[in-house]
Amino acid sequence: MRTAAPPRRRPTATILVGIGMLGVAGAIIARPVAGPAMLVGWMAVGFVLAGSSQLLLARGVRGLRILAGMVWLASALTVLWWPDPTTLMLARTLGAGLLVVGGVDLVVAVGLPRTSNLRFAAAAGGFAHVGLGLAVLRWPSISAFTLGVAVSLWLLLLGTRVVVQGADRLRAGDAPEVVATGRWSPKARVFASAVMLGVSAIAVAAALVVQGDTTPDPGPFYATPASFDPTPGTLLRFEVIDAFVDGATAYRVLYTSRDLRDDPVTKTGVVVVPDGSDPQAGDRPILAHTHGTIGIDRSCAPSLLGSAYAAQLWGLDEFLAAGWIIAAPDYLGLGSEGDHPYLVGSTAATGTLDIVRAAIELDQGAPERRFAVAGHSQGGHAALFTGEWASAYAPEFELVGVAGIAPASELAAFIEANDGTLFGNLLGAYAVAAWDRVFDDIDAESIVDAAALPVVRRLARTCVAIGPEAFGLMIQAELLHLGFLVSSIWETEPWASRIADNTPGNDLIDAPLLIVQGDRDSLIRPDIQRRFVDRLCTSGQHVEYREIAGAGHLDVDDAAAGMVVAWLTDRLTDPSGISTCAVE
């Protein structure tokens, strides 16, 4: 006699619950939340669905699954009934629930037969829950936006797992032995479980790295004196940096300069003086070495790195061997007090020209008054503006040449080209946060999605670095793919006008100019750089343009170092140089 088929309602309901979780995850990702009030409802629904899935899957391990289901249902009641819930309270509720249910999954895994392909899946689910729980609880200053991402990630993983388990039982008729053996491919289960483990491990690693992702805070050396000489370029303080580079002495310097309102401020940087020449001979030109993007927080100052900064100064050994004194500004607000005006040309120019003055004072007035300026990326932008400002701001100097390596030139075009990319989000967050601080007519809330504002502000406190810190930085920048700018910043006022004002090329540089570009640079695109050079040529600028085959944005400075050192050194004896502008 044929037995009746087991009821199919439970597996079908399990599948529908899993699909519901996936739907909630998608809804949160589609419209990231800006505050805890917006998140409460989604979290409550997610908790109810998670609790229901545990109850539906209770066969074979009924007591433990019922416990897990009750935990999630209690979590739903907690967030719904809690008076005025905060993001921190919601994060703790989710984190605690994940830890408890993760523990239940691990106990279930231990109780399954060793031959069961479900054992590894249950263990992976347990570790994934525990990992996500730890990440949520450890994430520093977690925002509703970030918590929403964590909730959607959890529901995405759990929902997929529940759908698979429901389908497994539906195919097998919900037979009790399925609990012990499973009918899906063991390889498929191992793969899916490995993905869950990997995601949770990444989440934990990101939380730990983000928690400590900045360089040390400045010490007393960087503090502005109670009173100081307001004359631009006055050397206020200096100290030797030990073991910086062979054949030279490096100094950390604090000097006077100007801010956006032309008020006296202090700025910092590094001056490197080569050994082996007579200071009184006055035969040592100065190279203003302007650095690329390193962050906008005060703790991001390159001079804070001490001797480790030498490795980041491309061409350092070659410049010193050619007799140049290196003057490398930190820029306003990096190290020194104040807000950093990221990609603001005027303060980059004054800070660069004033550290040249400070270098002359440091070397007791002995170096030549001839100088050059060279920089990469943001530093290229600073170099171009320094060239434009040199004759008016520092007429006592003779500018012999300017070199920009993949300079941030046509700002609007570069911003538009990188809109939505990982590095575009990072640099955009830096620019938005910095300009919100330094310009009275700029308000970040007018251009940034309210949900993404906490992430932007967190990025503003994070420095670009090599190693684990870079991982934390990229994770945060990646979050902005879910929501960032509400309109095209390059077309929205007053942002568009500020972008135009801080785009170089509006004034001629009274010296030869070299632009070097990598032909594989996806951030500062060569086609846009060529248009910038064409605009310079049209305006009458003396410019030489070179492209380096195979070079991208992050390696073009090292690839171009020898070329730039030779070109600038040649300008000391051949002031004219050549121009690659087409002759009409």
Image (cartoon, rainbow, N blue to C red):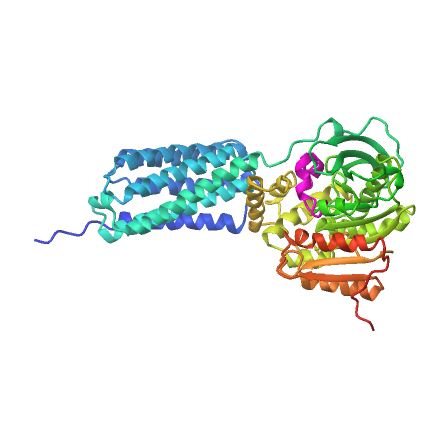
Is residue 575 covered in magenta? no
- Single out the residue that lies furthest toward the left: 1
**Residue 232: quarter of image:** top right
Q: Can residue 13 be seen by looking at this rendering? A: no
**130 up-or-down from 530: above or below:** above
Q: Position of residue 270 (x, y in %)?
A: 75, 38
Highlighted range, magenta? 293-316
Q: Position of residue 353 (x, y in %)?
A: 84, 44
**52 up-or-down from 185: above or below:** above
Is residue 296 covered in magenta? yes
**Residue 343 horizontal side relative to residue 539, left or right:** left
Residue that appears at 79% across and 36% down: 267
Q: Position of residue 149 (x, y in %)?
A: 51, 44
**313 up-or-down from 542: above or below:** above
**Residue 570: quarter of image:** bottom right
- Single out the residue that lies furthest toward the bottom: 584
Question: Foreground: 151 or 122?
Answer: 122
Residue that appears at 51% across and 49% down: 29
Q: Position of residue 565 (x, y in %)?
A: 75, 52
**Residue 128 horizontal side relative to residue 139, left or right:** left
- Single out the residue that lies furthest toward the right: 396
Q: Can residue 223 be seen by looking at this rendering? A: yes
Question: Foreground: 405 or 503?
Answer: 405
Magenta segment, principal secondary structure? helix
**Residue 556 horizontal side relative to residue 470, left or right:** right
